[in-house]
Image: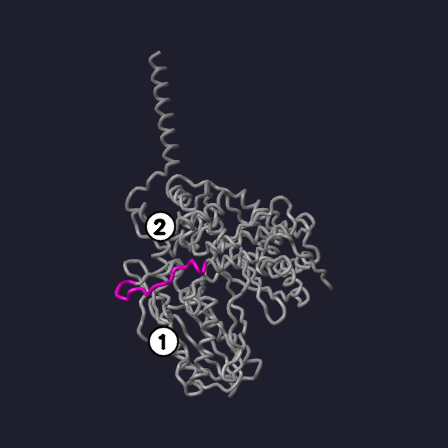
């Protein structure tokens, strides 16, 4: 199919506005000083949120990040071991542990850590069995949890397939790593291995700062006027009722939240990929804006909603000093797109681009801080995510060894539904990751097919209005919502009403029925921790947060908490107190009337 190319718009270039915004961020960014190492080193805001989530899910591997590399060529294992050790020496974060002191996490940096590189010989296995064993070992390795109080939070394993063929498994915890860090790690590995193979010393310059310096700086910088300026923007963008998107779910949310997931891939043909890139240039917007706007239109077609909030990751590295560091810098930002007024696709591009420029200028606000400050429902933060991968490229070869990343499905989904777009060769690839508790493979396959059909339609005619586009409806998920709304059961006075009052305060929702699922209502792990802490104070007793996670309904919590008697009487919630006072007044009034009748 040939795609006719639209004419360029006459409006000012949103793309160059975005470029200027990025440059402005870099120039305005304050230099990061080295933090003193003689006190307790704090975690960054993102690390702290993740640390507390881990405390609520002990033994979980959901935040393990896995990388699998196929190495083709003559590999010197001793030099590879030395290379890994040198990278560990360069980056303090790879030698950092996160113990708790008085219930609060701190960073402790070891002066040196030995990185083991066990070698597993698979040469005797037939080729089909080797492939199966590689996947089994990679999955098994990624599912082994880390002890956050012990370093390193990084481990390797080398699989030997033949004399000139290996597979390197690397598992790291998200507390010390992100996607950009993967590129930093592989570039340094290639540079150091090349140098060591030639008998040279490390050619890499010393790093001016370390991740702990960034974490300390972030805590000192993000306060006062700067914090208020950041908050003011987000408070304005996220004012009013925050919508959740009516996704085409095949089942209601489970009682116990699950991260079990799967992925479907969409290979966007080269011809369409080229047309999308050309459209990006002619409309003078980034490819991110093109693809993100199209994704919003797809969500609109499924949900019929004109007010959409979608999460998107940012690298968090607009400061020059951070670009060469390994660590957890990435952040999630919220894009709120309005599709009111039946706009043309070109108008949608302008709206998305305008929001993108402003969002990127205010990307330093940590999501978890924003969520707490503005009481953002958890469903908004974990429902839908879109990403266009634009991290620096990894090396494809070092010392004559070809490096090929292997994509092995992890079976994990942190969002209900996410779409990630990346370039591979001359075409674009879409990866839709989804929670298998909510969606079937058939539904997601259809979703991705519709996305490609929508892209084709938009490229052919970017002047189309919303009402000109095909509607991809799904009546199942509406039936499920209607059923859920009719199942409200009011909490009974006593323990159920006490729990409901705490839920309402923390979730900023009311009324809440006794069978409502905490996570389905948008609750987050940190909010569950707060609920546990409040109930402990109110009931004057120890409560296992882990047990509350297993009972995410008011009725379930009430049954659990009723198993042992509270050490002091339950307080009467305000609503119940008012009801009791009204009953007392009515009883006294009835008594007075009876006494008057007797007198007469």
Q: Nearer the viewer, residue 99 or 345?
A: 345
Note whether residue 162 is visible: no
Left or right of residue 33, residue 257 in this image: right
Going 57% across and 82% down the picture, which residue do you hit? 127
Q: Is there CB contact under 8 Å for labels 2 and 1?
A: no
Q: Quadrant of the N terminus?
A: bottom right
Answer whether residue 28 is magenta in the image: yes
Number of the front mark, 2 or 1: 2
**Badge 2: few (under 14), some or many (20 or more) residues near its Cα, within 10 Å?**
few
Q: Is residue 366 above or below residue 304?
A: below
Answer whether residue 481 is magenta in the image: no
- The residue tagged with tag 1: helix, strand or loop? helix
Going 51% across and 55% down the picture, which residue do you hit? 311
Q: Is residue 540 above or below residue 430?
A: above
Q: Quadrant of the C terminus?
A: top left
- The spot of residue 117 in percent (x, y) is 41, 80
**Badge 1: few (under 14), some or many (20 or more) residues near its Cα, within 10 Å?**
some
Q: Nearer the viewer, residue 210 or 536?
A: 210
Q: Main secondary structure of the magenta part?
A: loop
Quickly name the residue at label 1.
89
Residue at the right extreme, as displayed: 1
Note whether residue 283 is visible: yes
- The residue tagged with tag 2: helix, strand or loop? helix
Q: Is residue 301 above or below residue 192?
A: above
Q: Which quadrant of the structure image shows residue 330?
A: bottom left
Read off the magenta span: 25-40
Q: Which quadrant of the structure image shows residue 94?
A: bottom left
Residue 224: mark in rendering: 2
Residue at the left extreme, as displayed: 38
Q: Nearer the viewer, residue 324 or 294?
A: 324
- The spot of residue 373 in percent (x, y) is 40, 48
How far is mark 2 from mark 1, CA to CA? 36 Å
């Amino acid at each position: 199919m040939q795609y006719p190319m639209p004419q360029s718009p006459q409006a000012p270039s949103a793309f160059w506005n975005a470029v200027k915004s990025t440059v402005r961020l870099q120039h305005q960014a304050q230099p990061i000083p080295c933090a003193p190492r003689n006190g307790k080193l704090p975690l960054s805001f993102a690390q702290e949120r993740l640390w507390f989530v881990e405390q609520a899910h002990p033994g979980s591997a959901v935040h393990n990040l896995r990388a699998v590399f196929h190495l083709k060529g003559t590999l010197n294992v001793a030099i590879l071991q030395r290379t890994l050790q040198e990278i560990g020496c360069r980056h303090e974060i790879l030698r950092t542990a996160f113990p708790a002191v008085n219930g609060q996490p701190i960073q402790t940096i070891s002066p040196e850590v030995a990185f083991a590189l066990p070698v597993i010989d698979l040469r005797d296995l037939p080729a089909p069995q080797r492939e199966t064993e590689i996947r089994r070992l990679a999955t098994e390795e990624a599912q082994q949890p880390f002890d956050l109080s012990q370093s390193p939070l990084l481990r390797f394993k080398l699989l030997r397939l033949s004399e000139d063929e290996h597979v390197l498994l690397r598992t790291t915890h998200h507390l010390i790593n992100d996607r950009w860090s993967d590129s930093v790690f592989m570039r340094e590995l290639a540079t150091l291995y090349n140098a060591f193979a030639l008998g040279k010393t490390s050619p890499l310059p010393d790093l001016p700062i370390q991740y702990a310096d960034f974490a300390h700086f972030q805590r000192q910088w993000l306060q006062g006027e700067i914090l208020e300026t950041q908050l003011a923007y987000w408070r304005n963008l996220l004012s009013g009722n925050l919508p959740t998107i009516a996704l085409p779910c095949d089942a209601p949310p489970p009682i116990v939240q699950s991260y079990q997931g799967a992925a479907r891939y969409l290979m966007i043909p080269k011809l369409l990929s080229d047309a999308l890139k050309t459209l990006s240039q002619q409309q003078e917007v980034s490819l991110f804006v093109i693809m993100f706007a199209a994704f919003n239109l797809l969500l609109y077609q499924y949900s019929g909603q004109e007010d959409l909030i979608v999460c998107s990751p940012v690298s968090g590295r607009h400061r020059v000093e951070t670009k060469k560091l390994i660590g957890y810098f990435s952040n999630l930002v919220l894009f709120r797109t309005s599709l009111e007024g039946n706009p043309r696709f070109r108008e949608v591009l302008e709206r998305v681009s305008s929001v993108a420029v402003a969002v990127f200028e205010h990307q330093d606000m940590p999501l978890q801080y924003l969520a707490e400050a503005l009481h953002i429902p958890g469903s908004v933060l974990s429902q839908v995510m879109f990403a266009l991968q634009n991290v620096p490229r990894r090396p494809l070869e070092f010392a004559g060894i070809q490096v090929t990343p292997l994509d092995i499905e992890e079976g994990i989904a942190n969002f209900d539904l996410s779409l990630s777009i990346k370039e591979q060769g001359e075409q674009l690839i879409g990866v839709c990751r989804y929670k298998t508790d909510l969606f079937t493979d058939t539904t997601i396959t259809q979703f991705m097919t519709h996305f490609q059909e929508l892209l084709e339609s938009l490229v052919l005619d970017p002047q189309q209005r919303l009402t000109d586009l095909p509607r991809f409806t799904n009546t199942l998920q509406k039936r499920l919502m209607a059923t859920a709304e009719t199942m409200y059961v009011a909490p009974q006075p006593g323990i159920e009403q006490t729990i409901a009052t705490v839920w309402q305060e923390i979730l900023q929702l009311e009324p809440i029925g006794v069978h409502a699922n905490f996570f389905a209502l948008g609750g987050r792990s940190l909010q569950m921790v707060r609920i546990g802490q409040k109930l402990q104070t109110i009931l004057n007793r120890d409560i296992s947060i882990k047990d509350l996670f297993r009972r995410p309904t008011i009725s379930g919590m009430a049954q659990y908490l009723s198993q042992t008697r509270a050490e002091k009487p339950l307080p009467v919630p305000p609503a119940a107190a008012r009801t009791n006072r009204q009953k007392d007044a009515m009883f006294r009034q009835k008594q007075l009337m009876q006494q008057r009748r007797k007198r007469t």
